[in-house]
Amino acid sequence: MRHCLLFLLFAFCMLPGLAAQTGEKTLEKMHRKYAGKWCNTLTFVQRTESYQHDSLTKTSTWYETIAYPDQFRIDIDDPANGNATLFRNDSIYVFRKGSLTRKDYRVNDLIFLLGGLYFHPLEKAKTLMATLGFDLSKGYETTWKGKAVYVIGAVAGDETANQLWIEKKRMILVRMIRHQNGQKEEAVFENHIRTGKGWTETKISFYLDNKLFQLEYYNDVKANVPITEGHFDPAQFGKVNHWKKPKR
């Protein structure tokens, strides 16, 4: 009887879908699927809605440019006004009315998580993921909005850990939870469209301590478009042509 029970336990553990899925294994699947295939650049027009106490307080238009793995530019309203934020490598540059007002150290984790990781060798991607606070030794499988997902960085039922929810079918990020400065931050990524051989979300909902504070909607999304040299160079800000033609 004891041997029979041991055999049944072994067989149960070997059934498809029941083996533990670590975050490391999920990341390896993602990287294997999209490394060398993700689009190199992305441009889009974003409608940004700001909320406070569940009420809309402000709406603005952002013109965004991405060059993977780590260059990102946001022009707020008409780019000709000179109000923009540039992310380049591990630094952030803030411009107002054409003048640099702030420079600081900051890694944009979303650019990495939403595509940049596919431009690094797998081992470096693992290291960077850990640096961002996601424990690759933890992971499990569940469902999210009716779809099967892998979770990176947590065990089932734990929302106190930093974690990424990856849709199993397309291997794309659909939810992120992280904790910073004593607050819970959550982002939900939806309405994905094809961009080259990868995917791009066209709606993001951001929550702070379970309260909505920002909604983003992407329009006019274009992949692999040529970007003017110097577009992400703070020293060239305002001196090179922007992909969005200025208003007249």
Image (spheres, helix red, strand yellow):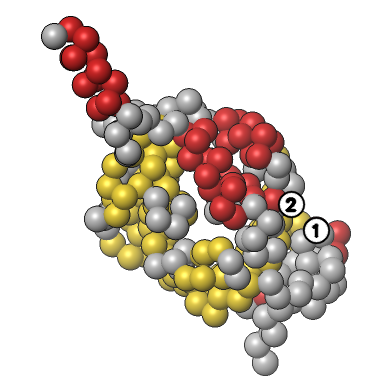
| Labels 1 and 2 touching (C-beta < 8 A) | yes
- Please name whichever residue, 11 or 109, is drawn nearer the observer in this view of the structure: 11
Q: Residue furthest bottom?
A: 248
Query: Mark 2 packing: few (<14 Cα in 10 Å), some, or many (20+)?
Result: many
- Please name whichever residue, 135 or 183, is drawn nearer the observer in this view of the structure: 135
Q: Residue at x 69, y 85 (%)?
A: 245
Q: Amino acid at mark 1?
A: Pro
Residue at label 1? 234
Quadrant for the N terminus in the image: top left
Label 2: element kind: strand
Q: Earlier in the sequence, mark 1 or mark 2?
A: 2
Left/right placement of residue 179 relative to residue 56 reads: right
Residue 187, given in percent of the width and then of the height, sits at 41, 50
Q: Quadrant of residue 101?
A: bottom right
Residue at label 2? 88
- Please name whichever residue, 17 or 30, is drawn nearer the observer in this view of the structure: 17
Q: Is residue 1 above or below residue 8?
A: above
Left/right placement of residue 31 relative to residue 178 reads: right
Q: Residue at x 50, y 30 (%)?
A: 136
Q: Amino acid at mark 2?
A: Arg
Residue 227, given in percent of the width and then of the height, sits at 76, 72
